[in-house]
Image (cartoon, rainbow, N blue to C red):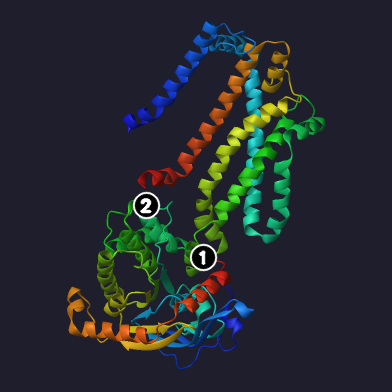
Amino acid sequence: MTDVGAAHPGASTPAPDVGRAVVHTTGVEKTFGTGPTAVKALEGIDLEIGQGEFVSLIGPSGCGKSTLLRLIGDLTTPSAGQILVNGKPASRARLDRDYGMVFQAPVLMDWRTIARNIELPLEIMGFPRDERARRSGELLKLVELEGFGGKHPWQLSGGMQQRVAIARALAFDPKLLLMDEPFGALDEMTRERMNLELMKIWGQTATTVVFVTHSIPEAVFLSTRVVVMSPRPGRIARIVEIDLPHQRTVETRELERYFELVTQVREALRRHEPDTTTMDELEAARIRAEGLG
Amino acid sequence: MINTRLANWLPPVVLFVLVIVIWDLGLLALGVQSFLLPRPTVIWAKLLELWPTTLARGVAFTASEALGGLAAGIVLGTAAGLATARWRTAQETLVPIAIGASTVPIIAFAPITLNWFGYESPLPRMVIVAAMVFFPVMVNTVRGLTEVEPAALELMASYAGSELQTLRKVRIPNALPYWFTALRIAATLSVIGAVVGEFFGGPLYSLGIFITNQTGISDYPSAWAAIILACGLGIGFYVAAVIAERVAVPWGSARETAR
């Protein structure tokens, strides 16, 4: 990873008026590839996410929502614009270990036990052994997997594995959690249960969460704000404030306001419906550019 | 557990015994001459007779050649694999050399190594074995180190993990199953390389020379006894590699049975 700040003059000096914003993006643009095959994935992304917020990014495939998340995490670099995390360039924030990341796949190491998977970031960051064991014990309790610490990943169900991934992301107590469709591969029932658990964890840990999802009900249920994105190039189409009671429970899904907000998000998405051919082009260009297979 | 183990082992053992019995009695019944194919009982008697005088020494010598070459080939192959996976320049320089080394015919190479080190030394065969083993070990090491889930690398990047940490905690454990696959291939190759290498020259008691000499004087049961021992050596090496893999990569086989 190269230093974003160095590539873009001005990015190295934080803007003075950021305040308590955890994530602050201005004029962010991302183009995959070069020349005639280049495809613009994101354009004009101005977004501010405050401390303790739960912000979902939602949109059709190819709208750049995952790219935006990866830009915030400095796992890829912007073509233009500025990204500040905790008031510093995203690359600096990554090196300072300011955020925890959860992917769609759990990405657990088969050769490690569940407890040692959770301890992986702590090992890398040089925590002493007893501190690591104490933290993994606490986190296993938090994600309700006590007694599974000695098991191996393949002995757990998909939902349990994803809970381990969340525990691992929280292990070093980051104030920002980046989640890239973490429940996308789970069945509907497991997903709803995971949503409730995530809300409980969010309430207990006071982290700021940026959450990428395909699911409208999930976005509305979890978030304080839903960022609706449109493709070609990826832009922020609308931001829907979710004014549901802060405490989200099973009953939240039965509130009339909940349904109204689901409808609002759905309509915002429909208004910016893409035509499928260009979406495929974008995806193809992204794969070419990143060398993914 | 013990029952399933027995169920796994019983069929091959029964088949083996059956083949030996049919071989022995079939040859007896048909009256086949022993220079065409000796009876197993005759071979076995020869093996016991010659073991103390020559065969034990031959097995030890050939095994030492195979082991020495195996060790050298594994060390060099792994080192080349690590360098290739890490540096592009290493990849560009080492891969053509490795491909070249793997295509050298042993039969053409053996007389030259003899010329380097002399007939009595085990070194000519060690060089041959090392050259044979090097390529599979290197290729599998590179695959294991580079065919890592991209998300695992991003995860390490998100922790600001160093390249060395990524190597130790992700790439090397990921490479171990690949590496042990190479080790299993290399283990059997090494005995073949040592024996075939000996055909071109070596001490009189070495298995390869013993086989050529005994066939030369039409003492086929003795040649067969040496061939059986060479097979046994190869199987022993292979089993040792499998056991080492079970110990070092417990998650490999456990995962297979869990799924």
Q: Are marks 1 and 2 on the same chain?
A: no
Front: mark 1 or 2: 2
Task: Give x and y (percent) for residue B204.
Answer: 73, 18
Residue type indicated by callout 2? Trp
Kindly identify the residue that appears in the image at 48 percent across and 62 percent down.
Answer: B152
* Category of crowding for the residue at label 1, using alpha-carbon neighbours closer than 10 angstroms: few (below 14), some (14–19), many (at least 20): many
What is the number of the mark on residue A154?
A: 2
Q: Which residue is mark 1?
A: B161
* Category of crowding for the residue at label 2, using alpha-carbon neighbours closer than 10 angstroms: few (below 14), some (14–19), many (at least 20): some
In what quadrant of the picture does the N terminus of chain A appear?
Answer: bottom right
Left or right of B28? Residue A218 is: left
Q: CA distance from mark 1 to mark 2?
A: 25 Å
Whether residue B214 is visible: yes
Kindly identify the residue that appears in the image at 77 percent across and 34 percent down.
Answer: B108
What is the number of the mark on residue B104?
A: none
Task: Give x and y (percent) for residue B131.
Answer: 70, 39
Q: Secondary structure at mark 1?
A: loop
